[in-house]
Image: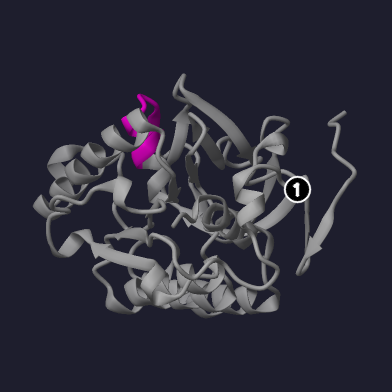
Amino acid sequence: MRRRRVTRVMIGSVTRVPSRGPAARSRTATAYPGAVLPFVLLAHRAEDAAADDEYASVLRLGGLKPPQLRRVRLEQGPIGDLDPTAYSGVILGGGPYLASDPDERKTDTQRRAEADILGLLDTVVSQDLPFLGLCYGIGMLGTHQGGLVDRTYGEPVGRLSVTVTDTGADDPLFEGLPETFEAFGGHKEALSTVPRTAVVLATSQACPVQAFRVGSNVYATQFHPELDSASLQTRIDAYREFGYFPPEEAESLKAVAREREAPVPAEILRRFVLKYSQS
């Protein structure tokens, strides 16, 4: 039986275990520090409505203000000389790219974006820099680390049940969360062979790897910590013709999204921001 710490505090509707160390000392009760290095969101959604909503939802659910989050849209141009050490952390967003597609099926833009991401991950992983990959991010980090990403464990758009592993229960981003919680997600590909460098933090019945960590500071999730009900509905509208679901089911999927929020995953995003915000 999993042993859980008993000292907890409540943050909103989420039960949370207090953390120790510099991250805990930097927290305030109402807001994040104002003068911090920004985070950078690496985005690649060509659909403006979805792209803008992704940026807004990372701000909203991460507790960030616009000056604290720079966005780089990889589908619009190369990553350039972006230095990950100049940021508090790197967040890689999701989107319609599939890491598992054969190279010949990828567009020139996707191939260039993926080369940029993999090059950046060389630095991130070797220096153990703060990184959080969201959905597509787990495929890119998994690929970078030698795992197998394929279509074995795809999940339909909507709600899914995530279970924190015993190792995850001791991780700063997952400790004190409910052992099983709801999340929003939907993906065609997933990690089917875990890299030897990875520590699995969360799983589900349909998808064995819902989150993992490399080193101490490099994270990726298959579910979407940056999604709430409103943002999920925006994504459903934006991607109704992209093969994630039959287009005629869009309105019923949006109705399911409106039934209730899935607040626990956003706590993971907030913790990432709190833990790694630096001046």
Q: Is residue 56 above or below residue 143?
A: below
72 in the magenta segment: no
- Foreground residue among 200 and 15: 15
Position in image of residue 65 (x %, y %): 45, 75
- Foreground residue among 256 and 31: 31
First to last magenta residue range: 140-150
Position in image of residue 11 (x %, y %): 76, 64
Question: Please, which residue is most extreme toward the left here?
Answer: 108
Amino acid type for the residue under numbered disc 1: Thr
Position in image of residue 59 (x %, y %): 47, 71
Residue that appears at 38% across and 67% down: 69
Q: Quadrant of the C terminus?
A: bottom left
Q: Is residue 176 above or below residue 197?
A: below
- Residue ID for mark 1: 180
Corner quadrant of residue 151: top left
Residue that appears at 60% across and 42% down: 206
- Foreground residue among 66 and 14: 66
Report helix, strand or loop for mark 1: strand
